[in-house]
Image (spheres, rainbow, N blue to C red):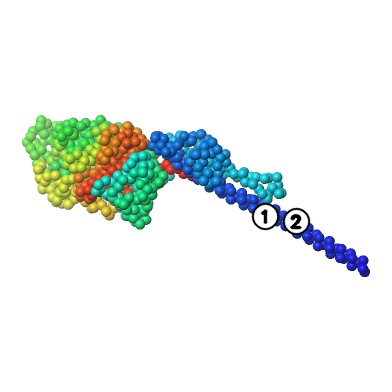
Amino acid sequence: MKHERIQERRRSSENGQAFIIIAIFIAVLLLAMLGVATDYTQLWARRQMAQGAADAACQAGAADLFLNGTDPTAAADFPALDFSWIGTSFNCGAKPGTPPCQYASLNGYTGSKVSVSFPTTLPGVGGIPAGFPAVANPYIKVTVTDAVAMWFTKLISSTKTINVTASASCGLNPINAPVPLVVLHRTAGPSLQVSGTASVTILGGPQRSIQVDSSSNTAVSVGTVNLQNAGPNGTGADLAVFGGPSTQPAGVNVGSTGHWLPGANPFGDPFASVNAPAKPTTAGTARPVPFGMNGCPDPAGCVEFTAGDYTTCSSGTISPGANGCLNLPYSGSNPKFSAGGTNWQANHAYAKGALIKPSTPTCVNSSNSGGFVFMATAAGTSSGTCPASFSQVRCTRQSDGTCSGGTTADGTVIWQNVGIDSTTPSTAIFDSGLYYVGSQGLSFGSGSTARVSTANGDGSLGAMFYFSTSGSVSIGSSSGSSSACTSVPWPYTSGTPNNCLVPYNTNGSLSSASTGYVASKALRCPSGSPTPSQVPATLSGNILLGPCGATSGIGGTGQYGSPDGNRGFLFFQNRSTAANGGACTAGFGGRCAILGGGGSFIFSGFIYFHNGNGGSCGSNTSCLTLAGGSGGNSFTIGNIVLDKISLTGSSGVTMILNPLATFSVLRPTLLQ
């Protein structure tokens, strides 16, 4: 019995020893697992730190890639920056002062732990589309390698450290962005100037209403800039500037939801991928037309221009229908007509709408003693001899815009007396289509006025002026200042009324009976945004409208209308032609566009004046002076992209930006 008890105690003791061994084994195993978990948690954390450092370093390098890649003279434009590190692979032990290495260092990684390379392509990235300027080094890749010690793992393994690798790839990538007012000059101070009593008010548009790319501390010099009703919600918008001033000027009102943003990355040219138009194969024409014809608002008559090539236009006396330059008024040293219309011709096939002005020697004076202009109401062929007398009764304009009465039969043609015209008109109307302008440029001088016509043209419902050389657009201070006609005596004879124009109706309706039911081209495009409420129903000054998107001609898809159906390119300056080096208003050098006039105006569409890289004054620079008239009804509707802009005038200009129109811009972007 005693022996049995001893054996039982021995077995009980041995059972306890086994439990202790098992417990120790489990504890060691758990400790090892906890250690490994701790090591790999640290590994994950260090991997995140390395990735953050790679991302920051990559984006810092991409910002310099953007400046260097989009500005051929970046080294001169930004003397404080060093771009020599771009292009050849290195590690930060060799070049610790470069932007990617500095940012990696701020995140805890230095020396050979950080490597930088410049791949020409990236997997899954489509590259820079055709149309953008070529960029030698479009991408940068930063790789961070971190040797992480395995404190617990090495107890159960021979692994003492594990290399954690994180990489980031960045580069210039096209993105779609709203296009606000963009001022592209890289160094000018100022490049945005609102001087004296001038003011600019911006309504609507994207959250960033104005972007100024200049690095100058005085990139913006403004009096009054009102953005309180700008932005998508009409409650304010941002004014961003790469340079300065660093504090918001007193005259800038960004509203309740806007901000002054100094130090903002340059925006770049949003229209860089838009190809310049091809030169038309046919020359444009100029002809005198009487009051009411295709929307001519001048009782004294207009010059009607058709779209086409104006690079070799004539600046002297021309025949009706010749290629006269786009310089108003048609008098003095500018072009003018040798006659008020083409003479009648025997046995000639005339198209509907053809105009003639019968005169000697083809027709005797008594055939058209009043010197009237006649329009063919239908296509036909004239007779062998001039009619004995053309009707001297002017047709009566109807409430639908047509004319009634005053007809003469001539073979199979019916001629209608449509009034008088002038060999020296001061008012121009432009048919829809592309105007390819040469060195003579587009100029509106003293007493002149310009409107778009109601003729179909190419069907785009607007005009685009492409300036193929250093010649640009100049609208003088006394252009567009003619008073509004309240009545037009019937029949109108030269001398009464003087210097008045039928007002333009923004909705495209006919004028009143007292002013002859003259038609206007609607400001709103068929598929475009409603006419802004701030624009008056009628104006009497210069009205120029760009082509509507989603129409035929130059407004068609992929052409020069706005992609959202609104008006597209109104003014487009050649980006590559050397500047003329002339002096511009407010001391600006280079090619100068001067828009405004003494009265009211509407310029609806994209205004694009950019040459070269916009990097120096007097060369490779396109400048715009925009002046509001004393009437206070001066509007630009659309988007403006240029190298420099100066706003002058006593009442200022209202800019109504389009929040929906988007175009591709190159931006430095984290890609992978």
* Mark 2 surroundings: few (<14), some (14-19) or many (≥20) residues within 10 A: few
Q: Is residue 50 left or right of residue 412?
A: right
Mark 1 touches mark 2? (CB < 8 Å): no
In this view of the protein, can residue 640 be seen by the observer?
A: no
Three-letter code for the amino acid on which mark 2 is drawn: Phe
Image location of residue 346, percent across then percent down: 15, 32
* Sequence order check, earlier mark of 1 and 2: 2
- Locate residue 335: give its quadrant: top left
**Residue beneath label 2, please?**
25
In this view of the protein, can residue 16 be seen by the observer?
A: yes
Identified at 89% across, 65% down, the residue is 6
Identified at 55% across, 38% down, the residue is 93
Identified at 46% across, 34% down, the residue is 84
- Locate residue 163: give its quadrant: top right
- Locate residue 368: give its quadrant: top left
Three-letter code for the amino acid on which mark 1 is drawn: Leu
Secondary element type, mark 2 = helix
Q: Is residue 348 left or right of residue 609?
A: left
Image location of residue 155, percent across then percent down: 71, 49
**Residue beneath label 1, please?**
34
